[in-house]
Image: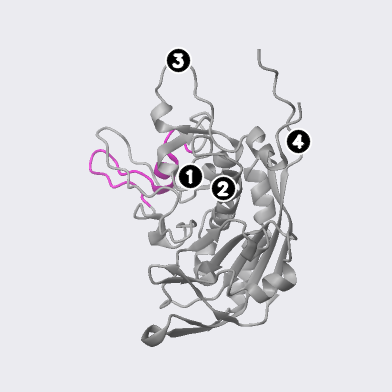
Amino acid sequence: MSPAPGPVSPEPQTFRALVLLYLVTNASYGSGLGRRRVQRVMTRPEREAVTAVLERLPATVRAWSDDLATIDPLDIVEIRRPLASLSSSGGGRWWAGPRDCREELLELAPEHRYDSVLVLWPAAPDVPLCGWGCTVGPSNATFGAGFTSIASDHWPTLATDPDPEQGYVHEWLHQVESIYRELGVGEDELPSLHDAGDFTSIRPATEPPFGESYAVYHDGRPGGTGDPGNRSDTGDPGATGATGHPGNRSDTGGPGQSVSPALPGVPALPGARTWAPWYRDWMTGRLRRLTDSDRGGSVPEPLGLTPERWARRSGPPAE
């Protein structure tokens, strides 16, 4: 008989985070005849809107993870030096990567001072970006921290986003995802952040996503009698700007990207425009594959970051 698992520490997994808020971009990108320059100053309303959401991240992460994770401290530093270059992310797209932020990383985030770095910078409409945000896991280039880069141009949408923190949480969770992949947690235990359309929750059907997939909950569903429903977007999270949070390097779609078809006799479902239930259940180990929903026999083990899986970052539970 196998011994009972050891206790899981009630203390949350703590991630020390640094935000580099570049106020000015005067950056060249490309080469040869294709060389370009982007010049823009972050406006005061833009800076205030973005900072207000960033300051809520620690409380949001703690609440959505049921106190299993926290960001502490969250140091937000306004960078007066213009961002002077952009890096290629492939496919003719660009981002403010670790090389472009090297001076600030050397000064503010030396070896293992932070677990997470988030960069916000003003872009311009004609710059082909890698995505809404782009993230890489810990590396030598970032002194052991995960690294996220987000252009701040989305800031007007924050006022109407039902959960304005969700894009920032998404990108931070890509950093978390990379850490746990390195610790051996595969997609059979922790699904990809972009697979929301394949999962529902083990929570009661009276709670979001109400027995639907997280993608249907977010996007909505047209009615089965020709009623288009009260859809709030086109089904592509990236299309609205307000609720599309690409996140994984050069992705351009959100966690769930499929459009739900109209089903005969099935009523329309308005789109909630938030991925919060997906992130909550991903961070608390309450995910279930849709293909397991009607399976008889034993109930499959919930997927996601259960307390036991979170604890792998600190080593195995004590015996």
Judge whether 212 appears above or below 39 on screen: above
Judge whether 185 appears above or below 111 on screen: above
What amino acid is labelled 4 in the image?
Pro
Residue shown at 50%/64% (left/top)? 157
Residue shown at 65%/70% (left/top)? 20
Q: Is residue 164 magenta?
A: no
Is tag 3's residue or tag 1's residue first in the polypeptide sequence?
Answer: 1
Q: From the top left corner, tell me how far across and down residue 318 is, in percent.
A: 76, 30
- Asked if the residues shown at circle 2 and circle 3 are in contact, with their CB atoms under 8 angstroms apart, the answer is no
What amino acid is labelled 1 in the image?
Ser
Q: From the top left corner, tell me how far across and down residue 11 is, in percent.
A: 76, 40
Q: Which residue is mark 2?
A: 177
Q: Which mark is on residue 10?
A: 4
Is tag 1's residue or tag 2's residue first in the polypeptide sequence?
Answer: 2
Which quarter of the image is occupied by the N terminus?
top right
Q: Which residues are magenta?
A: 209-231
Q: Which mark is on residue 192?
A: 1
Left/right of residue 11 with respect to residue 65 in the rendered view: right
Is tag 2's residue or tag 3's residue first in the polypeptide sequence?
Answer: 2
Is tag 1's residue or tag 4's residue first in the polypeptide sequence?
Answer: 4
Q: Is residue 230 magenta?
A: yes
Residue shown at 66%/33% (left/top)? 308
- Asked if the residues shown at circle 1 and circle 2 are in contact, with their CB atoms under 8 angstroms apart, the answer is yes
- Asked if the residues shown at circle 4 and circle 2 are in contact, with their CB atoms under 8 angstroms apart, the answer is no
- Per the image, label 2 sits on a secondary structure element best described as helix
- State the separation of the CA atoms marked 2 and 3: 31 Å
What amino acid is labelled 2 in the image?
Glu
- Asked if the residues shown at circle 1 and circle 4 are in contact, with their CB atoms under 8 angstroms apart, the answer is no
Is tag 3's residue or tag 4's residue first in the polypeptide sequence?
Answer: 4
